[in-house]
Image: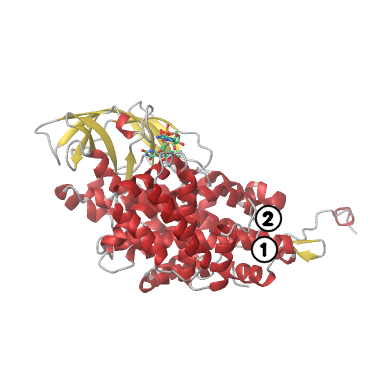
Amino acid sequence: MPVSDRFTTHVVENQPPPLAPYDAYATDVALREAVAREGGAWAEAQLIAYGPIAGGEAMALGVAANAHRPALRTHDRFGHRIDEVEYHPAYHRLMELAIEHGVTGFGWRRAEREGAHVARAALLYLHNQADQGTSCPLTMTYACVPSLEQQAELGRDWLPRVVAPAYDGRSAPAADKLGNTVGMGMTEKQGGSDVRANTTRATPVGTPGPGALYELVGHKWFLSAPMSDAFFVLAQSDEGLSCFLLPRFTPDGVRNAVRIQRLKDKLGDWSNASAEVELQGALAWMVGEPGRGVATILQMVMLTRHDCIIGSASLMRQALVQATHHARHRRAFGKALVEQPLMRNVLADLALESEAATALALRVSRAVDASVRDERERALARIATAIGKYWVCKRCPPFVNEAQECLGGNGYVEDSGMPRLYRQAPLNSIWEGSGNIQCLDVLRALRKEPASTDAFFAELDAVRGGSALLDRETAALRKLIAADGADLEARSRRLVERMALAMQAACLVRGGNVAIADAFAESRLGRAHGTTFGTLEPDASLHDALIERVLPG
Ligand SMILES: Cc1cc2nc3c(=O)[nH]c(=O)nc-3n(C[C@H](O)[C@H](O)[C@H](O)COP(=O)(O)OP(=O)(O)OC[C@H]3O[C@@H](n4cnc5c(N)ncnc54)[C@H](O)[C@@H]3O)c2cc1C
């Protein structure tokens, strides 16, 4: 016997097989039900097509795109300023797959059909599980459409390329491409949440006004996806803070004066580049009314905030899938981990949280989708976007951490993919308006837009009788909101959390799975729950049902 065989120590046992490639849509019962419930079933062919890609080719690309981080090239070899970011080919392929399958444009191209934006949200939900960095430019490109529509001439020129199922990653003028991507620049050093503190100056090149060209001088402290074909930015014109569309190449086809100073060294989100830029007389068209910049860009911001909910729900889903897969294949103390009662409680509790996050995310998608047709849905989208952005994004980091722990030590090691999910987990809560800003936005809606308060309660009233605990909570919230005490701002996190939990409970009641809806209401509204995951009541059949839904068999 050769020495190497006699002394073999390296026998690999009791490690799970890799999960990917798998079909990320077909295996996701909660997502499929939510898509159908919220009116996106007619578009299922899109999701059926993207499911195996999101769980297969895109998963592998996501690993590569994050391992090879984007690099800044400020100058070419001769010393000319080029301000380009070089991405790994995996990044471009991810963008191509997503855009061709409708992650940016499907909702707009099929906007005449109810539920098109719900299906689009589900496409992003699938994509984001494979790679979160590309979700940033994909989201911004999707979200810019209502702001672009505010300037008819610009819209006519740009919209067909923005919603096209075509990606062109070349550094070239937008008009030379079949498809364009769009970013956003609001945050400056001295103010992010408080955008009115922006100091970038906008000076008209000719006759001022909407649609006219301005020269921008200033800086942007966070500008993600800096290779986008254009950016919506805010700058101070004579009339006050205004919104502009800043192309990366000027109308004459030369590089615009957008100087990339450096790329941020971020905690996570590594496939995506986020830059600090200086605008040194960069040309940009005014969009919307002068001095009404915040209102103009807010339409884009509402949609990116909506996508933060989708992104966090999707990140939780991916972490849960990995944890469940691992626990099914890993044995400890004579049983598969998934057979250990305490591990079952952890997985079941995570599954319940994930069901609720997905249900709420897609409910907000339907409100967004129906906004153009239905006033009440528009009012609901207004308040529910902020509620969902606050709560679902806040739940993501502890959730991912708990799922990571299900893998034991492997979950702390890069190869497992869990550290990447963990690094990404806080981001949706921080950007596009951090937690407090969402709570203040909910208060603003409650105080200034009675239609939003009515739409919120109508949503809870629609399932009255479905859960006694929810009915009790609805009554308590009504009182609390009506009282509107002077200290409500300082208490608004608690209020928004309760509003979010009530909405999630209502979504699950409407979903029709009584065991799941009751378990959510008892644990989250009735407080039969601890402060960590894995603290559900020890109901074995409920735990079975929840875990079985995560990944069939
Ligand atoms: C990876 C990454 C990428 C980004 N990409 C972009 C991009 O492409 N474009 C872009 O424009 N921005 C981008 N941002 C910026 C992001 O949107 C801001 O960082 C965020 O909105 C917070 O703004 P700030 O950093 O200035 O924090 P601040 O506004 O200083 O806020 C700091 C904290 O104070 C809280 N706070 C603020 N005001 C109040 C108040 N009145 N009451 C109570 N609490 C308050 C906030 O909630 C936050 O927790 C990105 C950020 C990150 C991390």
- Looking at the picture, tell me which residue is in the foreground, 374 or 447: 447
Tell me if residue 336 can be seen: yes
Q: Which residue is drawn at 14% across and 30% down?
A: 205
Image disc number at residue 406: 2
- Distance CA(mark 1)–CA(mark 2): 19 Å
Q: How crowded is mark 1: few (under 14 residues within 10 Å), some or many (20 or more)?
A: some
Left or right: where 327 falls relative to 392: right
Q: Residue at x 68, y 68 (%)?
A: 539
Q: Quadrant of the C terminus?
A: bottom right
Farthest residue in the left direction?
207
Q: Position of residue 466 (x, y in %)?
A: 48, 71
Q: What element carries label 2?
A: helix
Q: How crowded is mark 2: few (under 14 residues within 10 Å), some or many (20 or more)?
A: many
* Residue bearing the label numbered 1: 537
- Looking at the picture, tell me which residue is in the foreground, 379 or 402: 379
Q: Is residue 339 above or below residue 409?
A: below
Q: Where is residue 285 in the image (x, y as percent from the top left)?
A: 19, 39
The amino acid type found where label 2 is placed reads Cys
Tell me if residue 179 can be seen: no
Q: Is mark 1 on a helix, strand or loop?
A: loop
- Looking at the picture, tell me which residue is in the foreground, 276 or 531: 531
Q: In this view, does 277 lie above or below 228?
A: above
Mark 1 CB lies closer than 8 A to ligand 1: no
- Looking at the picture, tell me which residue is in the foreground, 162 or 513: 513
